[in-house]
Image (cartoon, rainbow, N blue to C red):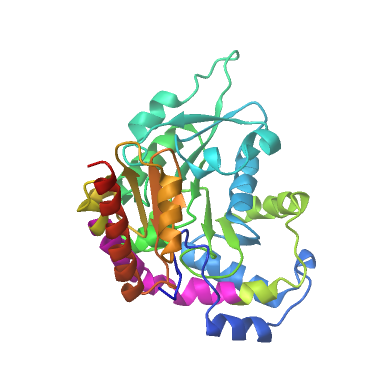
Amino acid sequence: MSETIDLRSDTVTKPTAAMRQAMAEAEVGDDVYGEDPTVNRLESDAAKVFGKEAAIFVPTGSMGNQIAIRLHTQHGQEVICEARAHVMDWEMASMAALSGCQPRTVEGARGVLTWEKIRRAIGPKVYYRQPTGLLCIENTHNMAGGTVSPLEVLKDIWRGAEEAGIPVHLDGARIFNAAAALNASVAELTVGFDTVMFCLSKGLGAPVGSILVGNAKAIERARSFRKALGGGMRQAGVLAAAGLIALHDMPKRLGEDHANALVLAKAIASAASAEIDLDAVQTNIVIFNLKEGHDPTNFCAALKIRGVLASAIGPQSVRFVTHFDVSREMCEAAAGIVSEELSALARSRA
């Protein structure tokens, strides 16, 4: 096929025409001095959308998460997170390197943590054990396949954490996907979190950037930590202009990505050489395992030859991520190719 269908991640999207125009025309200033009007507007708008007091624009989601961990913890504490959490596996051990904390991992069903499981992992308040400094929830959960934490589960966590006196941070890189899946607002899904990070550059399609929201005092401190991490940008309004379109215009179309993910998932479910939990395909991520020792790297290489890009994410696992640069027609074409390649695997073991 002539057109590559890139399903490796929703980070591969190109800026829309409206984003490119807004970037070209953006009013800018020096953001380190707080003088970039477009950045200031993006931060103000993001805080309002989430019902928080303040927000800060950061280059990456990882930086936003690590600033939050630094805000809430002290050296020698633990951060409770899910066993496959992004802050655990994909942020270069930064909670240890930057905040002097170690993760305390808890396995959640399909990546969803409950207060009962979290409660059992909280460190005892005795002088000879490291205390729990922070809970970190991921919604949606990337490596669990884009699964969503329901609002009632989150409410239990908020109540329990408040009683225990432990702050709670949300890695909400794809929180707008969760909101679309639950038909809820991001403000509803995040009201009980002390801080929330969300990405503009994943499903929302901006070329660069994430936002950390919280109370005014926390975000004021966050500016110092952002500067220390090299995240103090100058005429960043060029990037924030695209972020404003991502924030206001792109959430309403995320349901299309979720529907396209199901097209891929159903094709995989019908193959004898793969196994997939269809109930876990709740948003725009599809993760499945190859059976009988088939190698996912080789499988992805075979797909690439046929114009479909995917990610091998483990000894058996393959991941697809849908986004606005892959249409329903493209996903249907990819599903057909995936089915053919999975059938070829089954024949090779026959």
Residue 215 lies, in percent from the top left, at 58, 54
Residue 319 in the figure: left or right of residue 101: left
What residue is shown at x 31% (from left), y 37% (from top)? Answer: 109
* SS majority, magenta: helix
The region drawn magenta spans 242-266
- Residue located at (39% from left, 48% from top): 318
Residue 120 in the image, given as x and y percentages of width and height: 39, 24
Q: Quick check: can you spot residue 141?
A: no
Residue in the foreground of this view, choosing between 33 and 144: 144
Q: Is residue 116 above or below residue 183?
A: above
Q: Name the residue rendered at 78%, 64% in the picture.
A: 32
Label total for image:
0
Residue 350 placement (x, y as % from top left): 22, 42
Q: Is the N terminus in the top left, top right, bottom left or bottom right quadrant?
A: bottom left
Position above or below: 78 against 200: above
Residue 46 is a magenta residue = no
- Residue 113 visible in rendering: yes
Instruction: Please report the residue visible at 41 percent of the width from the left and 65 percent of the height from the top.
Output: 306
Indicate the position of residue 24 as horizontal and vertical percent values: 67, 84
Q: Nearer the viewer, residue 174 or 290?
A: 290
Q: Nearer the viewer, residue 105 or 274?
A: 274
